[in-house]
Amino acid sequence: MSAIDTLATELSRLPGIGRKTAMRLTYHLLKQPAEQSKRLADALVALADNVRPCATCFNLTEEEVCSICRDPRRDAGLICAVEEASDISAIERAGEFRGVYHVLGGRLSPLDGIGPDDLTIPALERRIASGNVHEVILATNPSIEGEATALYVQRKLSPYQLTVTRIARGLPVGGDLEYADGVTIAQALSARRSM
Amino acid sequence: MSAIDTLATELSRLPGIGRKTAMRLTYHLLKQPAEQSKRLADALVALADNVRPCATCFNLTEEEVCSICRDPRRDAGLICAVEEASDISAIERAGEFRGVYHVLGGRLSPLDGIGPDDLTIPALERRIASGNVHEVILATNPSIEGEATALYVQRKLSPYQLTVTRIARGLPVGGDLEYADGVTIAQALSARRSM
């Protein structure tokens, strides 16, 4: 297989990139200086070689313990449990949360064969047992599987002396009632707060 | 900058890939075995190191002369001139053309500072002067710049003993008259053929 076809094949393995886009990207790279392809190659190798899960929270990091867990200004007693490390970036972008995280490594999904043993729930329990954790916020996705995962974790944590909360569901800020789905509206109504 | 941010930055340099898609692709790669990132990196390095323009037609190749120019079953006297090497793949996919190619390396575009000297027109003239070329098909894009380029090349080739043709413009096969733009319809009408 030619170098062009090989690269296009590798690129088309990525999600959302079909054969045509892969060819377009390949031809684009051919028009750029060779350094651009090599910088991209170096970045891929560095990613594969250096990035691993944080020993404490399973966030992705290039150190033993991630920068959020190491930050002394953050409240180590407030843990926000998320499905994936990518969810941490989303929450950090919001700039509101000053606690630490715990990456569950997915959601319970019996149909995909993902059970409690495939998630990092025992590690979360060990963190709680060994420290001064006062609250765990369950920030799994508001999907059926995310809800089931939150419910499962909540039950697992019930023996411990701490508050377990769930992120609020409701209408997204800037959203339009007219275009919101019925389940979201129902959630927004039942979770209404006095003003 | 972290390995994750570095890769996301490099990926977001690619056309059609914004910051969000780049992060999504990076996290996707982190969930795959490290070999996938490394195969992609190898393919990028191989592309940068091995692919170069064909000495005859400027098609992209890993040899001195590309496989189309080397193919003895193809008519070396029939040259199809295209703007970019990627146009060759498109024409080859159609499976109709049995001649050879000449990649002009772009189109005339005074606004972008691309003049005749930036294209491979002198090399095309040398090919014609030295061989038995009987026809040059100008297959530049049916855009204003593509038309101007075709016109320029046609004038440059007028001293030579050969036929110069232009690919047909008209309604695309499977297209719909109702949704075709006015210029395409006008071209299709003026280029009508007796049946």
Image (spheres, coloured by chain):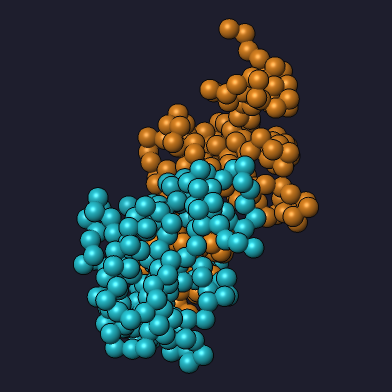
Chain colours: A orange, B cyan
Q: Is residue B67 above or below residue B184?
A: below
* Outermost residue, front side: B194
Q: How many numbered marks, from 0 up?
A: 0
Query: In x, y percent, where is residue A64?
Result: 43, 56
Residue B174 makes an appearance in the image: yes
Query: In x, y percent, where is residue A120?
Result: 62, 50
Query: In x, y percent, where is residue B162?
Result: 36, 79
Left or right: B72 as drawn, with respect to A37: right
A116, B87: nearer the viewer = B87
Left or right: A119 as drawn, with respect to B41: right
Residue A165 makes an appearance in the image: no
* Outermost residue, bottom side: B72
**Residue at left 45%, top 29%?**
A96
* Outermost residue, top side: A195
Left or right: B8 as drawn, with respect to A190: left
Left or right: A59 as drawn, with respect to A179: left
**Residue at left 49%, top 86%?**
B74
* Outermost residue, right side: A111
B62, B174: nearer the viewer = B174
Q: Quadrant of the C terminus of chain A?
A: top right
**Residue at left 51%, top 70%?**
B91
Q: Is residue B93 above or below residue A20?
A: below
- The picture quadrant where one finds residue B43 is bottom left
- The picture quadrant where one finds residue A82 is top right
B78, A90: nearer the viewer = B78
**Residue at left 33%, top 89%?**
B131
Q: Is residue A85 above or below residue B155?
A: above
Query: In x, y percent, where is residue B128?
Result: 31, 82
